[in-house]
Image: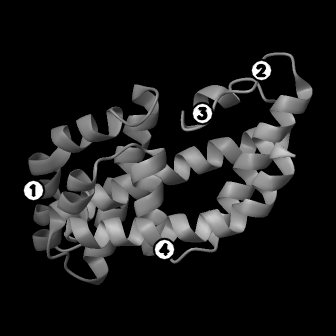
Amino acid sequence: MTDEKQRSVTAAIAAYGKGLLGFIRKRVKNDADAEDILQDVWYRLSAVINSHPVEQVGGWLYRVAINRIVDKRRKKSESLWESGTPEGAEQTMPTAMPAAVDGDPEAKYQERAVWERLYAALEELPAAQRDVFVWHELEQIPFAEIAALTGEPVGKLVSRKHYAVLHLRKRLKVFYDELTD
């Protein structure tokens, strides 16, 4: 890494380090996870800066941080499903759905199935629509904050989420009908 690139990474760490760590801490469960994500963001910055310059460093850093947070949550929820241990699943799942009744295997199975189908339907979406839906609905990040981080207008983000919701309704309707019958 050249001295100029090293100085730019050091300047980014000095300028955004505390704010970015605080941003990440608000969205993860513990400080160790926050520090791991922050370290990954710095690593990615140092790797990317070697290949091409980053124009809006702040926006880029926050976007990478959000993506890492989402990836970490997906990985945790997937590992819970694979292990078959629902303990703690209620804490890792967003609060958009009621938690399964304790001791009721059927309710736990249905809850796990709903989340599996939701994540499968989310994977079918274009990345921009999926990201906005996950950030706003599952991560509870306000549109204004997403707009500030991505540089996209709020109206465009709302439109993307609208199309994501339409797709998810269509894909999950059959499953919903099965559960309610």
Q: Is residue 39 above or below residue 92?
A: below
Give the distance between the C-alpha atoms of the residues marked 1 and 2, in whole angstroms. 50 Å
Q: Position of residue 81 (x, y in %)?
A: 79, 42
Q: Position of residue 101 (x, y in %)?
A: 77, 20
Q: Nearer the viewer, mark 4 or mark 1?
A: 4
Q: Secondary structure at mark 2?
A: loop
Q: Is residue 43 above or below residue 76?
A: below
Image position of 174 (left or right of 56): right
Q: Residues within 10 Å of mark 4 (few under 14, many from 20)?
A: few
Q: Nearer the viewer, mark 4 or mark 2?
A: 2
Residue wearing tag 4: 127
Q: Are marks 1 and 3 in contact (CB under 8 Å)?
A: no
Mark 4 or mark 3: whose residue is earlier in sequence: 3
Residue wearing tag 1: 11
Q: Residues within 10 Å of mark 1 (few under 14, many from 20)?
A: few
Q: Residues within 10 Å of mark 3 (few under 14, many from 20)?
A: some
Type of residue at label 2? Val
The answer to whether residue 26 shows anywhere in this view is yes
The residue drawn where x is 86% and y is 52% is 178
Mark 4 or mark 2: whose residue is earlier in sequence: 2
Residue wearing tag 3: 92
Q: Residue 101 got which mark?
A: 2
Q: Position of residue 105 (x, y in %)?
A: 90, 27
Q: Residue furthest right?
A: 106
Give the distance between the C-alpha atoms of the residues marked 4 and 3, in whole angstroms. 22 Å
Type of residue at label 3? Thr
Give the distance between the C-alpha atoms of the residues marked 3 and 2, in whole angstroms. 16 Å
Quarter-of-image position of residue 23? top left
The residue drawn where x is 49% and y is 46% is 138
Q: Residue furthest front?
A: 181
Image position of 120 (left or right of 158): right
Q: Secondary structure at mark 1?
A: helix
